[in-house]
Image (tube, helix red, strand yellow):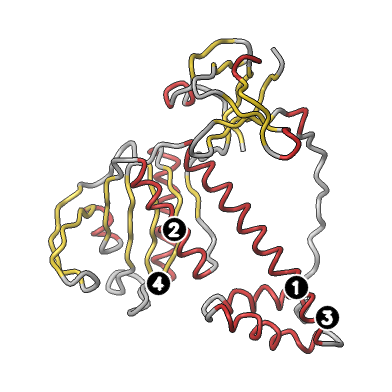
């Protein structure tokens, strides 16, 4: 057997294997936590200004960054070079986060797209965020919920929302049908709200994800908001990025990626756990395989 204990992920079209010998992992250096200085460093100033600049039109962002950092360097050329280097770093990190997100999405089952809306009759924004986060955390540990979501403010009212894709194996409360008027679509709409969250948090919306296309549209919706506001995604529950399998030589279609260090697998490859044949790849078989990040 040529490849043992190999990481495998799905890219939306094919299964890709990452042989451990082709990607040796060295020991990561532990970074000592630096004492925070009263005066922010140029990198810290850039990070803060970069977040603020996301609200500006694209053509104005670099100008805004240069204005915020001009006192940190001797020349305008040094400012420009510093900004370009750090924008490239931010873009690279964003790409890695998106790649990580999609690999996690493809490896899980999802059944709801959910929105929770801040209600100032029940909470302050601070208590809304804290209590909703704690509730979802407990549901993940006790009921097996999984979710990937993001905080967002509505464009007009700036009211805080939490949007997320969810896997809910066991619902709490009840889903009730509610009809109301959509100011955005200018028509009456039907939504399904959960009685538990309605009582403790306010308005919510549970949409069933029936097809893979529904899931992908929901993920694009989340990515739109993290691109717009530079928000970080919030993960909950057990969300591995890969499953592990031994790979047979006859299940390898060809090499893949830089220097063919990865392996493109046939769509019906055999999943093998420590020498035990688990069956041809499928959601049911993958659920029995060991997972990792």
Quadrant of the rendered structure where residue 110 is? top left
Q: Give the mark nearer the N terminus: 4 vs 2.
A: 4
Observer-nearest of 135 and 217? 217
Q: Give the mark nearer the N terminus: 3 vs 2.
A: 3
Observer-nearest of 249 and 177? 249
Report if the CB atoms under discs 4 and 2 are less than 8 Å apart.
no
Report if the CB atoms under discs 4 and 1 are less than 8 Å apart.
no
Residue hosting label 1: 43
Residue hosting label 4: 153
- Left of 126 or right of it: where is 64? right
Bin the neighbour count of mark 1 within 10 Å (Cα to Cα): few under 14, some 14-19, many 20 and up: few
* Residue 211 in picture, x, y percent from top left: 31, 40
Bin the neighbour count of mark 2 within 10 Å (Cα to Cα): few under 14, some 14-19, many 20 and up: many
Q: Give the mark nearer the N terminus: 2 vs 1.
A: 1
Residue hosting label 3: 78
Q: Give the mark nearer the N terminus: 3 vs 1.
A: 1
Up the image or down, 221 lies above or below 8; here it is: below
* Residue 134 in picture, x, y percent from top left: 44, 54
- Left of 132 or right of it: where is 288? right
Q: Nearer the viewer, mark 4 or mark 2?
A: 2
Residue hosting label 2: 222
Up the image or down, 187 lies above or below 196; here it is: below
- How far apart are labels 4 and 1 at the CA level? 27 Å
The dot on residue 181 is none
Seen at 34% across and 70% down, the residue is 123
- How far apart are labels 4 and 2 at the CA level? 13 Å
Seen at 76% across and 88% down, the residue is 70
């Amino acid at each position: 057997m040529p490849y043992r204990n190999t990481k495998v992920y799905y890219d939306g079209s094919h299964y890709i294997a990452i042989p451990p010998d082709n990607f040796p992992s060295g020991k990561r250096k532990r970074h000592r936590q630096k004492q925070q200085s009263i005066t922010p460093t140029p990198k810290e100033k850039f990070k803060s200004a970069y977040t603020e600049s996301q609200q500006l039109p694209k053509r104005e962002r670099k100008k805004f960054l240069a204005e915020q950092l001009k006192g940190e360097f001797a020349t305008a050329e040094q400012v420009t070079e510093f900004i370009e280097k750090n924008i490239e770093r931010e873009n690279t990190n964003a790409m890695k986060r998106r790649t990580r997100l999609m690999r996690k999405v493809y490896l899980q089952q999802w059944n709801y797209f959910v929105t929770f809306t801040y209600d100032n009759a029940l909470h302050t924004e601070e208590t809304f965020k804290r209590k909703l986060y704690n509730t979802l955390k407990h549901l993940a540990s006790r009921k097996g919920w999984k979710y990937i979501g993001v905080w967002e403010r509505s464009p007009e009212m700036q009211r805080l929302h939490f949007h997320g894709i969810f896997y809910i194996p066991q619902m709490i409360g009840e889903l009730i049908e509610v009809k109301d008027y959509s100011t955005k679509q200018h028509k009456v709409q039907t939504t399904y709200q959960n009685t538990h969250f309605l009582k403790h948090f306010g308005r919510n919306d549970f949409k069933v994800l029936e097809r893979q296309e529904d899931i992908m549209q929901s993920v694009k919706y989340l990515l739109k908001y993290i691109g717009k506001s530079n928000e970080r995604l919030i993960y909950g529950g057990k969300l591995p990025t890969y499953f592990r399998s031994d790979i047979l030589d006859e299940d390898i279609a060809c090499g893949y990626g830089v220097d063919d260090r990865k392996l493109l697998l046939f769509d019906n490859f055999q999943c093998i756990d420590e020498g035990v044949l688990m069956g041809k790849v499928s959601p049911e078989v993958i659920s029995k395989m060991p997972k990792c990040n």
